[in-house]
Image (cartoon, rainbow, N blue to C red):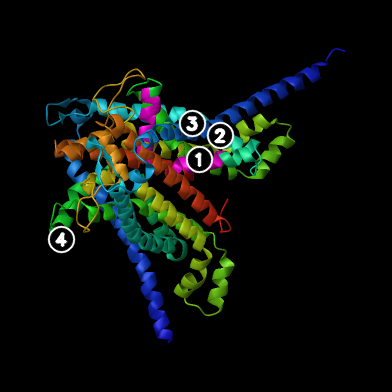
Amino acid sequence: MYRWRKFINNFFIGLTWIASLVVAAVLTYIILYIAAKGVSYVNWGFITGWPKGFEARGGIFPIIVTTFYLTIFSALLVTPVAVGGAVYLTEYSHPASRFSRIIRFAADTLSTVPSIVYGIFGFAFFVVYLGFGWSMLSGSLTLALMILPLVLRSTEEAILDVPRGYREASYALGATKWQTVSRVVLKAAAPRIVTGIILGMGRAFGETAAVMLTAGMAINLPVSVFDGGRNMSSHLYLLATEGISLEAAFGTAFLLLMIILIFNLSAKRIAKRM
Amino acid sequence: MLKSKEQAFHEAIRHKEALIQGFFVLMASFTILGLLLLFVYITREGTVLFKQVSPLEFLFGKDWKPTSGNFGTLPLIVGSVVVTAGAVLISAPLSLLVAIFLAEIAPKKAAAYIKTAIELLAGIPSVVYGFMGIIVLVPIIRSFFGGSGFGIVSGWIVLAIMIMPTITSLSEGALAAVPDRYRYGALALGATKWEMIYKVVLPAAKRGIVSAIILGVGRAIGETMAVLMVLGNVPRLPESINQPIATMTSIIALDIAYASGMHKYALFSLGFVLLLISMAFIAIVRIVYKGSYGKN
């Protein structure tokens, strides 16, 4: 009887090890496979050149610029709203008040809305109704709304983890609420707020469905906010599904994956500093 | 009476503080405004179709041929359900094992590595999963099952990997929130480690784990690009597990580029259905999660 129990114990504990190793192996395989196939296509010409000809050889410079444009612009749009909203929820409102419960419900709902629904919303509202067209503005507004719940929730958690004593010490020194919030609370929570913003940028960087419908698919070097453009993941999608050029697809996938990994690892590193 | 300098100073501070609070209220209400706009626009565009096609015909019609006026979405809904169900059945046990490993078994260093791996998997864009699906998985499925390789099985596997981080990290949170005295109690009664996990920790974390799986289901239903790339996108009711199929999300993404008229409104109606599904999931999770450990 005891030996049987011990066997069951070892069997299931072994199983959890195997499952975890499988997960690690899947990640390693994806990264190594894309790296092995893609690294040889990524060179200076690929990063700074324009796509040429039917097979989309040459570089993906305008596509890289579009991707960064959308990512940075959407981060600029989302930061005041998400951080401001989180400060309101944690520092100003009563947590059980109706208003703050509605805000939390709205954020939770927004976080489960599929990206394609953001896409068709952005298309109907920003592109068509407001007349922004397929543009950096439409794309960034849509992305900002999409990553809002992620940034809001992570900021909220970061602020909640600031010890109460910090605030009390600040008030005891005669500081006003705003002085306390801006110089004590936000300062202490800053690394993890930045982490949340970077994770949001990572999502915006790799998003496809919501971007294709709002920023368009034309290869273009965007300058004004009303210019359209194609981002890297949309480019990868088109190359992969239309079988135009596997070389350019692997190159794009490699670059995309590396930048996303940098986003995620640096977010983790910054969070550790708190 | 003249105000003293001090009174004026305090009044200025009060004004400034009120202004700043107003700014935060405004920022907070943008979140509600965003959801409201999304809901209103998707509802407005998504209900136009129902002036011509009854909702029952839309939901239960078996023919999706929008260019010739047949707007039956049953094949798409069944497609979404079949693909999601399979993916969750594969992913949930695997994710739960990993969550148990992280919360109960792993040495510190191993847990840190696996956690990083899960965070990175969560960050990989869905188009990269779809690309890997086309390049690596589809040929494997083709050699095992025949056919084109694009279809339900490929969708299951790709989606199962994609929702794994969601289910794992949320389940792990639920397990970690179970108080240690439960564990000590079980061990003191002579339970083995697995008996402690299976008979004490898992039941205590049940609600959290169920919510994690529900949120995983929600992610799977809403996933678009990866599914679009490996499913083959033929809108018909499934007869075998190795046939191409279409889902609600894949059809929206595929058709929106060229659709016009009622066809376009039908796609918005699909978006409307998806929006209602995500709201329903949040409501269910809130009910399930109430009374579990580690809620905030």
Name the secondary structure under disc 3: helix
**Residue under circle 2?**
A85
Mark sitting on residue A79: 3
The amino acid type found where label 4 is placed reads Phe
Instruction: Give residue A185's position: percent from left, percent from top.
Output: 61, 37
Instruction: Give residue B99's position: percent from left, percent from top.
Output: 42, 60
Determine whether A95 is above or below B172 in the image.
above
User: What separation in Å lies between label 1 and label 2 (alpha carbons)?
Assistant: 10 Å
Q: Which is in the foreground here, disc 3 or disc 1?
A: 1
Query: In the shown orientation, is residue B14 left or right of residue A100?
Result: right
Q: Which is in the foreground here, disc 4 or disc 2?
A: 4
User: What's the residue at 29%, 27% (across, down)?
Assistant: A216
User: What separation in Å lies between label 4 and label 3 (alpha carbons)?
Assistant: 49 Å
Q: Are marks 3 and 2 on the same chain?
A: yes
Magenta part of the protein: which range?
Answer: A103-128
The amino acid type found where label 3 is placed reads Thr
Name the secondary structure under disc 4: helix
Instruction: Say whether marks 1 and 2 touch (CB < 8 Å).
Output: yes
User: What's the residue at 39%, 35% (across, down)?
Assistant: B46
**Residue under circle 1?**
A107
**Residue under circle 4?**
B144
Q: Which is in the foreground here, disc 1 or disc 2?
A: 1
